[in-house]
Amino acid sequence: MTPRIVISASRRTDIPAFYMDWFMDRIEIGRFEIVNPFNGKTTVVEATPETVHTIVFWSKNFDPFLRSGYGQILAKKGFHLFFNFTVNSTSPILEPRLTPLAERLEQAAALCDAFGPGTVQWRFDPICFYTAGDGSIHNNLANFDAIADRMETLSVKRCITSFMDHYAKIRKRTAAIPGFNFIDPSLEKKIEILSHLKATSQKRGMTLFACCEKTVLEALPAGMDIAPAACIPNRYLVDLFGGHLSFQRDHGQRTGRGCGCMVSRDIGRYQDQPCFHDCLFCYANPSCDSRGTQ
């Protein structure tokens, strides 16, 4: 018996916020035609309840998805749904175009109410340190505890975090902002932060996972166990929904850095589906930055 697949929608852009009409059109057709962003080849991904075990949605704003009832339509068709919901602290410089934090937390509540808290994976990602203007050091950890408090009331049990990666395209983008620089904290500082986040999560009944942080996890002191993250967690999806899935690691991701994601088919498109959140640290959106930098 051939296992069904997981559709990832999407690491490449925010489909629930901006492209659900397109997504639902493709679901009606029963397939996606995906252009590989690296080699230009087009492949067809079948998208029926018979071929797809779970659709994993990634977003920072599920409001359009929720308002239009897309999730209920997909569930009635027979698709299982899972949500990677990135909810970070309020930061106009890092994430300038997001809806207010209170509204995003209400979206999390709506997802949990409609589909169950087990389908929601909270991503506090990435953790950023930076200098701005006067040279003082800032970070985006301020609202972690408050967000965790709300997730506890919703019975969300999984939190994924990571530290920002300093890609060249990000350095090029931030060069246009006077006095702004991202800072990579020391290993000791990262361990200190993860220790706090783990304790905070644990007190609220959540498990903390670290995404692509192999070096940090290997340096943790004895007794401070934090598991590597799998944002596409096929074993968990089988536990949640039953059925069969491949448990093969996705070697197209950063497995050497500790990525635990399992195989899926990402149906997002860099070429013609820009994300309009304009997050300063974004690695996935080199083509569109309405701040005017590339």
Image: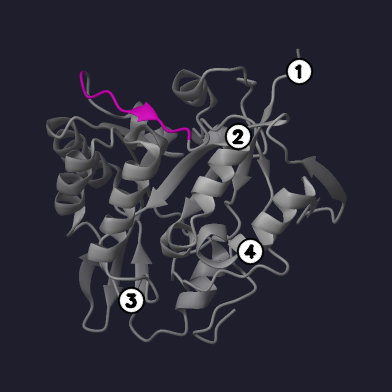
Amino acid type of the residue tagged 3 in the rendering? Ile
Quarter of the image where the C terminus is located: bottom right
User: Quick one: label 4 or label 3, which is nearer the N terminus?
Assistant: 4
Quarter of the image where the N terminus is located: top right
| Relative image position of residue 211 (x, y in whole percent) | 43, 39
Classed neighbour count for the residue bearing mark 2: other residues with Cα under 10 Å, few (<14), some (14–19), many (≥20): some
| SS assignment at label 4 | helix
Mark nearest the camera among 2 and 1 is 2
Classed neighbour count for the residue bearing mark 4: other residues with Cα under 10 Å, few (<14), some (14–19), many (≥20): some
Which residue has dot 2 on it? 78
Disc on res. 93: 3
Classed neighbour count for the residue bearing mark 3: other residues with Cα under 10 Å, few (<14), some (14–19), many (≥20): few
Disc on res. 21: 4
For the point 27% across and 23% down, the residue is: 225
Q: Confirm whether residue 213 shows in the render.
A: yes
Mark nearest the camera among 4 and 3 is 4
Which residue has dot 1 on it? 2
Q: Which corner quadrant of the image does residue 60 belong to? A: bottom left
User: Quick one: label 4 or label 2, which is nearer the N terminus?
Assistant: 4
Q: Which portion, as a residue range, is magenta?
A: 223-230
User: Quick one: label 2 or label 1, which is nearer the N terminus?
Assistant: 1
The vertical placement of 263 against 77, above or below, is above
Classed neighbour count for the residue bearing mark 1: other residues with Cα under 10 Å, few (<14), some (14–19), many (≥20): few
